[in-house]
Image: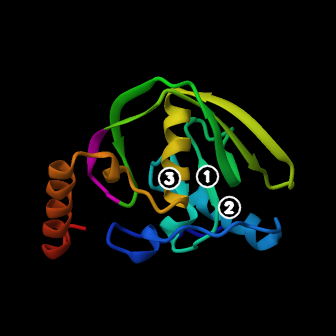
């Protein structure tokens, strides 16, 4: 497996809507396993294909610390939510070192295809639900800072620019 470069905020691919995957072939499987390896190495809980420079609807979720039950989602679609939004600290591998409070549904149901081309549906709560929403947003070209008030988003963007200019990123 290979460790992939994670694209940082400012890379145009992060603002490009991802394409549907039509066939689960060896290339898709290899990409998924490489993404898992990358998210584990980065100590993240999720990674979407656009974050590694590939504009397809694929994401991996690894909220378990033992690395025994990652979820690989192809063409995920959130089909329902519990209606209750909770604000919690959220970060992103494309924004290293930045964390902000973001309101998300505490529970969602997501439909997706797995690596065996089976269509599955899971009901999620808490951190898993938050991770799913965050990664599906990446596939739709939406970033966690888009949920922030305008003044806060500008503040984060300014700090990112300063970090980039000083070589801290």
Q: Marks 1/2: CA distance?
A: 7 Å
Q: Earlier in the sequence, mark 1 or mark 2?
A: 2
Residue 64 image point, x, y percent: 58, 35
Q: Residue at x 58, y 72 (%)?
A: 55
Magenta run includes residue 63: no
Q: Residue 103: give x, y in percent of width and height.
A: 37, 34
Badge 2 crowding class, 10 Å Cα cut-off, few under 14, some 14 to 19, many 20 or more, is: many
| Labels 1 & 2 near each other (Cβ < 8 A) | yes
Residue 100 left/right relative to 103: left
Q: Residues within 10 Å of mark 1 (few under 14, many from 20)?
A: many
State which quarter of the image contains the N terminus.
bottom right
On the picture, is 1 further left or further right than 85? Answer: right
The alpha-carbon separation of the residues under discs 2 and 3 comes to 18 Å
43 in relation to 103, above or below: below
**Residues shaded magenta:** 95-101
- Check disc 2 and report the residue beneath it: 32
Residue, x 46% and y 74% (percent of image)? 13
**Residue in view at x 20 percent, y 61 percent:** 157
- Which residue lies under the disc numbered 1? 60
Indicate left or right for 118 with 163 as reference. Answer: right
Residue 6 makes an appearance in the image: no
Residue 31 in picture, x, y percent from top left: 67, 68
Q: Which residue is mark 3?
A: 137
Closer to the camera: disc 1 or disc 3? 3
Q: Are marks 1 and 3 in contact (CB under 8 Å)?
A: no
Residue depicted at 28% across the width and 45% down the height: 99
Q: Is residue 141 visible?
A: yes
**Circle nearer the N terminus (2, 3):** 2
């Amino acid at each position: 497996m290979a460790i992939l470069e994670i694209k940082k905020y400012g890379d145009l691919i992060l603002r490009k809507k991802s394409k549907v995957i039509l066939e689960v072939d060896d290339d898709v499987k290899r990409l998924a396993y490489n993404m898992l390896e990358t998210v584990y190495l980065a100590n993240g809980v999720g990674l979407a294909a656009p974050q590694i420079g590939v504009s397809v609807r694929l994401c991996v979720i690894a909220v378990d610390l033992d690395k025994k039950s990652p979820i690989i989602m192809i063409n995920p679609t959130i089909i329902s939510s519990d209606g209750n939004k909770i604000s919690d600290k959220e970060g992103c591998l494309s924004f290293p070192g930045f964390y902000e409070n973001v309101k998300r549904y505490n529970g969602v149901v997501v439909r997706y295809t797995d690596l065996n081309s089976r269509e599955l549906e899971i009901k999620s709560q808490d951190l898993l639900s938050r991770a799913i929403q965050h990664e599906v947003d990446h596939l739709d070209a939406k970033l966690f800072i888009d949920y922030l008030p305008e003044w806060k988003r500008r503040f984060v963007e300014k700090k990112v620019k300063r970090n980039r200019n000083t070589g801290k990123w």
